[in-house]
Amino acid sequence: MKEMVADVVIVGGSTGGCAAALAAAKTGYKVIMTEETKWIGGQLTNQAVPPDEHRWIEQFGCTRSYRKFRNDVRSYYGKHFPLSELGKEKPFFNPGSANVSRISHEPRAALAVLNDMLAPYVHSGKVIILTETKIKAAETDKDDVTAVEVEQVYTKQSYVLRAPYFLDGTDCGDVLPLAGVEYVTGAESQKDTGEPHALVGDANPMEMQAITHCFAIDYIEGENHTIEKPRDYQFWKDYQAPFWPNTQLDWTGVNPVTLQPITYSLFREKDKFSLWEYRRLIDKANFKEGLYDSDISLINWPQNDYWLGPVIDVSKEEKQKHLEGAKQLSLSLLYWMQTEAPRLDGKQGYPGLRLRPDVVGTDDGLAMFPYIRESRRIKAEFTVVEQHISAALRETAEVFHDSVGIGSYRIDLHPSTGGNSFIDISSLPFQIPLGSLIPVRVNNLLPASKNLGVTHITNGCYRLHPVEWNIGEVSGYLVAYCLKHKLTPRQVRNDQTILEDFQRHLVKEGIELAWPTVHAV
């Protein structure tokens, strides 16, 4: 067992974990960051999910370093790819021309950009990244974490990592139970939080949003790329949830807002929503003719949302069952589209749909990690609830004196393991309070992903890419500030003079603390 020491250990190289590493290293501190897959970047890379962002993202509403990431993605394509005249003419180049994202791009491009952003600190030794390395245990001394034990997945080499500060940048909040940090999971009740959309009756810690095992495909007309029939295909072909209007493998789903049936189309069709364009990663029209044989689309649709059981705080066997179930659902959706899906021309199936394992960096063609929408959440000094941000309850979001960032997205919850359908309601552009990043008891562990002090409901808008980046970046800067001034995060938040000094530091580093006058989303 090897021992390594740093100023901060970041467990989990997620979107927020990477932002935290950049912030801490930029300030001069040594970072060790672990990641259980071979790609850092979380939702942006190993989960293959292109950025979900608000409508003002090109002008304001994110941190300077997140904007640099977005600009560098555009520069990556502009520098290395032959663009068409159409692609060159676009003022805000969107590689996939997706209708859900203003900068939908391949996970490989995000990985390249993140590696470039971290390169100066990796080369100088300020940042050490241990990929394919997973946390096994944590050591504590009263209210402090003193070390974590991690293991390389394939070589089984173990490391003990020691530091004054630890950040949990995992997508499930994996450090929290191991370090004895107080946390919550699942759905709170109305009597717990007073939230109008919380559960009536008792809380349900096992009610969590669906996970999705994403995959990328292109379409080659006239060719046959049909995969082997998945083991659970018949189950998914016949399965229908009580809150769903049809079987799972069908073009008809549920409108997330109205909860009424909606019929999609694969390719563009009059008066129907095109699933192909929804999260398209590459629009071949943006590139010189002949470079791409086809568009490339990312399949993260209602049809492959998996809600039959949670993967957090269950037995290893139960977790593996649901992880495999999510894979089987995604493969079954692809097989159904290739063989039985109704077509515009009256035929059945699109055998030309081709799985693209190269796009996601795996052998089986599925993303390295499922898209996890909901994490363990710390019990924090302050918890954001629906009443702080709901457009139905107030005209502007709550103004937090300890704001350390901003975000905006609808409260968007996917169907849950408790058997409930979508919750998709309007929210107001919001702030991120520092109190939501500070555990109620533990002194030197901070969240750097979706594991901050929010509820099941407010997680629905605090979980997206630019907000997660902001959370991680602020946690990185907070650790650096505390080390420099010999303070604790709690002291920073609870002393107004110190808090204002820290906030000035954040503003200097390009973090927006308040919104201009904008409207609900």
Image (cartoon, rainbow, N blue to C red):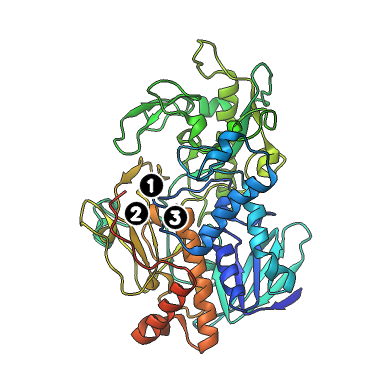
The answer to whether 293 appears left or right of 410 in the picture is right
Q: Residues within 10 Å of mark 2 (few under 14, many from 20)?
A: many
Q: Residue 327 or 100: which is nearer the viewer?
A: 100
Say which residue appears at 52% left-offset and 19% top-offset.
341
User: In the image shown, does 69 or 34 lie closer to the viewer?
Assistant: 69
Q: Earlier in the sequence, mark 3 or mark 1?
A: 1
Residue 179 point in image, percent of width and height: 54, 72
In this rendering, position of residue 129 left or right of residue 52: right
Q: Residue furthest right?
A: 155
- Crowding around mark 1 (Cα neighbors within 10 Å: few <14, some 14 to 19, many 20+) is many
Cβ–Cβ below 8 Å for labels 1 and 2?
yes
Residue 413, disc: 1
Which amino acid type is shown beneath numbered disc 3?
Arg
* Callout 2 secondary element: loop
Under mark 1, the amino acid is Leu
- The kind of secondary structure element at disc 3 is loop
| 377 sits to left or right of 258 | right
Work out whether mark 2 precedes mark 3 in sequence or the reverse, and give the earlier one: 2
Judge depth for marks 2 and 3 and give the one in front: 3
Nearer mark to the viewer, of 3 and 1:
3
| Structural distance between the alpha carbons of marks 3 and 1 | 10 Å
Q: Is residue 290 visible?
A: yes
Q: CA distance from mark 2 to mark 3?
A: 11 Å
Q: Residue at x 43, y 52 (%)?
A: 57
User: Which secondary structure, mark 1?
Assistant: strand
136 lies left or right of 275 = right
Picture disc at residue 463: 3
Residue type (three-letter) at the residue carrying disc 2: Ile
Residue 457 numbered mark, or none: 2
